Amino acid sequence: MLAAWLLRELSMDMVEHVARTKARATGTKAVPLDEAWSRYLGLGNATGLGMVPFVINHPDYLDAWCRMREIPLAAGLGRDYTPDHPDLSRVAELLTRADRHLGEKHALNTAPFLPSGAIRPQLQQLLKALKDYINTASEPASVLARLHETAARMSPEARGIFASIVIELRSDFDENAEALLRVDGPAPFDTAMQCWELKQVLDANYAWARSYDFSDPERTRYYWFSSAANEEPRRARRITRPVGTAEHCTDIVRRVNALATDLERFPASRSLAEFLLAHPGHRFAAARVQQTRPYVYGELHDNLIDGEFLPLSTQRFQLATYGMNNFSPQSTDWLRVTLFSGAPRAMDINAGTDEDDWLFPTAPKEQGQ
């Protein structure tokens, strides 16, 4: 991420260098890039299908990313606020900024996600409800929790934006976030575990996976593989799979379901080692169930080989975790984004004037606008 930020700096330095060079050659004057606009300009990026298996292959990362969001969110939603609490004014400010930010994105292609024109009225409704509380309430109340529930009923987009705003209220979370970003590797695979214990873990953490019916070919329409031409993961219809093509282990749900079926038929008091001697094909699934045992958010609750699986949702989640915005899907499999729009420049950091307040960046306005 530091390298990406430095590339943003380099790009602007190069533009100004070329302008000065041309000006000297032509006897004209080079105009430097406006400082406000230089902060607004971000770094263009795009992502493809390779991001999706990455999330699946790193459940510890997934758990850490989600906890970094959920812990400060729970802190903000779990308290009562008096009408004059400064946090509520901050929420109102950010809702207004988010509305303006989306107003500038009206031409951005967002399908299959909601367009900005559909989200803005939802944010305006939340802002009105918040202002009504500030102006009329007399007792402390869990107003942010209520607004978060309202946003959830509106749309995933409104809920996500409101959650991002609540998270901004925490200014003392840096050390916790740094600790969460230090992720240890998984514990060694324990084949001495008894089958009843593994089944308990499976029932507790993977009950959601049992709802898939893999006798339906739509649940296994796709397979994932490494592309020799692109040198990264791709997916294709299973009926087109050439004989001998290696399939990535992205079919977590199918493997867990098959493991659960055979576990139910095996003596519960026997060890996992004995079970795997009889069913060696379940080693990956058994290790996965063990590996994700300590995680609250270690598994993506979706079937990646399903005919209805939309890679964009997983890609958008991961890129949003990295702080990107301006999500513009180009197909079902890849999208364009912007990174560091609104971020400080190197000159701001050197001068000590960088402010950690660039959520929902908006274009600079001329005086009088």
Image (cartoon, grey):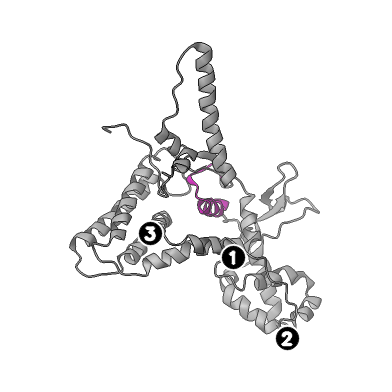
Q: Residue at x 57, y 77 (%)?
A: 204
10 Å neighbourhood of mark 2: few (<14), some, or many (≥20)?
A: few
- Give the x, y percent position of residue 131: 24, 57
Q: Which residues are magenta?
A: 311-331
Mark positioned earlier in the residue sequence (3 or 1): 3
Q: Are marks 3 and 1 in contact (CB under 8 Å)?
A: no
Q: Which residue is mark 1?
A: 299
In the rendered image, which quarter is residue 128 located in?
A: bottom left
Residue 231 is left or right of residue 101, and the answer is right
The residues tagged by marks 2 and 3 sit, at their Cα atoms, a distance apart of 52 Å
Residue 337 is left or right of residue 73, and the answer is right
Point out the frontmost of discs 1 and 2. Answer: 1
Q: Which residue is mark 3?
A: 169
The amino acid type, in three-letter code, at marker 1 is: Glu
Q: Which residue is mark 2?
A: 267
Q: Judge whether residue 344 can be spotted in this image.
A: no
132 over 38 or under it: above or below: below
Mark positioned earlier in the residue sequence (2 or 3): 3
